[in-house]
Image (cartoon, rainbow, N blue to C red):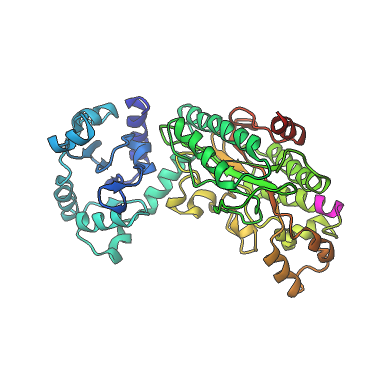
Amino acid sequence: MFNAEVYAERRNRLRAKMSSGLILLPGNREASMNYPANTYHFRQDSNFLYYFGLDHPDLAAIIDVDEGKDILFGNDLTMDDIIWMGPQALIKDRALSVGVNHTQPFNDIKDYLSAAIAKGRKIHLLPQYRAMTILQLESLLAVRHDEFNRFVSEELIMAVVDMRSVKDHHEIEEIEKAVDIAYDMHTTAMKMAMPGLIEREIAGTVEGISLSRGGPVSFPVILSVDGQTLHNHYHGNVLETGRMMVTDAGAETTMHYASDITRTVPVGGKFNQRQRDIYEIVLGTIVNSTRAIKPGTYYKEVHLLAAKTIASGLIDLGLMKGDVDEIVSQGAHALFFPHGLGHMLGLDVHDMEGLGENFVGYDKTVQRSDQFGLAFLRLARELQSGFVLTNEPGLYFIPALIDQWRSEGKFMDFINYDKVEGFKDFGGIRIEDDILVTTDGCRVLGKPIPKSIDDIEAIMGG
């Protein structure tokens, strides 16, 4: 945890952003895998962590906007619990460690909320993503699940997004720790990417590195020679020379801050000419787009710059044709680059996405496009100093999409389908860094992870 003052200051700032009422923040509970006592690794709710910092199940908290106090609800453990789990801190001591002076048994929260509702006080809730939490809140608030959303507060969502979007120095240090763990994960994957290995051997090793450094991976490892599938969690392919291996993986620190890094390498350690040609386009795209990241710039514009860089490179290879600006404005490039350039990063790998992607990545000055590809952009809004985001351009040859567009006669003036046919066995390439927006530009976080052709070949050859 951070110091108690950090959490107290965050709660006070949140309180100042709200008009009135009670902010209810439920923590997560244990989730069973296949029978009650066999649970998944516990992961606390990120908003609860941000404001209360306690990484334990079966807690809930109230921030009272009107009375200026915070209350932690939870139960001390019984002797049966201690026998299985060892000694645990008392609820009052846990509360003090994060600057909270008021505690009550967990079941008291229902009466507290009932009394507030009876007085006409507003209860503010964030959107929930776990069914068991929604069921618990139904009981606490005495409502049916189809009435639950009336407590979800846009005022609270906007206040939380405003606060969590700008990372303080404590958070940046944690994210850099996560990136440095990812350095070991990705350089290990590079060295292992040799013919004859099965993908799961590398994916398992990568995940184990994260676990050995104190936290789980920040999302299920994506590792595949079939990189044309954007989120490929199948790890059963045997590596063969001539294929490219995409590894998209990140770590969580012990405080649950995330990294999200992607590298693509040639199986066997040497790029052939076709691989070099495509890789250099993506490498040039991440270099150009990173240079464009600074406060006051809209990330949508950075995305469009990336799209133009990719389209220009494909024109040089004869895979596309025509005017670059026209290609991108009409969306023809999305055959090869069908996803958004990046997303916010922090306590969540897609930071705050559970609060609503449009609240996090968009605002009143920029709206989501309905154009294929551009519609998938998670982050489009104006960048501010203190934002941490991912920059992850990619170039893919998706056979089913190529066949569909060609059969429909789409963008025949821009796409050289005859030449594209020869790349349907290629797969895909994606390169991703984690970026801090600074006062006058940006900084790539963490120890530099090899991404130039020379650096990748050197580390794989070593």
The residue at the point 13 percent across, 35 percent down is 79
Q: Is residue 180 above or below residue 106?
A: above
- Camera-side residue of 156 and 141: 141
Q: Quadrant of residue 441?
A: top right
Q: x and y percent of residue 308 in the render?
A: 76, 51
Q: x and y percent of residue 409 in the render?
A: 77, 73
Residue 298 visible from this viewpoint: no
Q: Would residue 241 be found to the left or right of residue 83 on screen? A: right
In the image, farthest residue toward the bottom: 408
Q: Would residue 29 be found to the left or right of residue 373 on screen? A: left
Q: x and y percent of residue 37 in the render?
A: 25, 48
Q: x and y percent of residue 261 in the render?
A: 59, 40
- Name the quadrant of the C terminus: top right
Residue 187 visible from this viewpoint: yes
Q: Quadrant of residue 335?
A: bottom right
The residue at the point 78 percent across, 43 percent down is 280
Q: Would residue 342 be found to the left or right of residue 287 on screen? A: left
- Camera-side residue of 318 and 193: 193
- Name the quadrant of the N terminus: top left
Q: Would residue 351 be found to the left or right of residue 318 on screen? A: left
Residue segment shown in magenta: 313-317
The residue at the point 55 percent across, 46 percent down is 200
- Camera-side residue of 376 and 166: 376
